[in-house]
């Protein structure tokens, strides 16, 4: 477990969370990306597609 400092200045213990993303048909952890790919991943924006109503 790793320790972090929250907004109030208290030290709290948390389990490190691994982020996976789908790349070329399979899932890879973001920690294994090179610096350029990490930068591109973190600048992505999520969006909802247009819903078509009849």
Image (cartoon, rainbow, N blue to C red):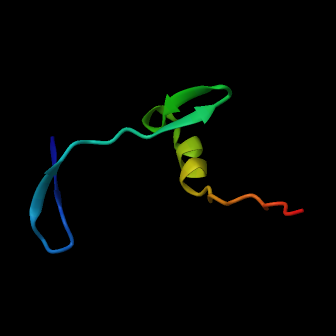
Residue at the spot 22% in from the left edge and 42% down from the top edge? 15
Residue at the spot 55% in from the left edge and 28% down from the top edge? 27
Residue 4: percent from left, percent from top: 18, 56
Residue at the spot 62% in from the left edge and 58% down from the top edge? 46
Residue at the spot 52% in from the left edge and 43% down from the top edge? 35
Q: Quadrant of the C terminus?
A: bottom right
Quarter-wise, where is residue 43 in the image? bottom right
> Between residues 34 and 9, which one lies in front from this camera angle?
9
Q: Residue furthest top?
A: 26
Q: Count all numbered tags in the image, as a single digit.
A: 0
Question: In the figure, is residue 33 to the left or right of 48?
Answer: left
Q: Residue furthest front?
A: 54
Residue 18: percent from left, percent from top: 37, 38
Q: Quadrant of the N terminus?
A: top left
Question: In the figure, is residue 20 to the left or right of 13?
Answer: right
Residue 6: percent from left, percent from top: 19, 66
Question: In the figure, is residue 54 to the left or right of 24?
Answer: right
Q: Residue furthest bottom?
A: 8
């Amino acid at each position: 477990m790793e320790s972090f400092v929250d907004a109030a200045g208290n030290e709290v213990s948390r389990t490190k969370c691994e982020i996976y993303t789908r790349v070329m048909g399979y899932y890879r952890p973001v920690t294994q990306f090179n610096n350029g790919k990490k930068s591109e991943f973190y600048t992505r924006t999520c969006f909802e597609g247009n819903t078509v109503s009849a």
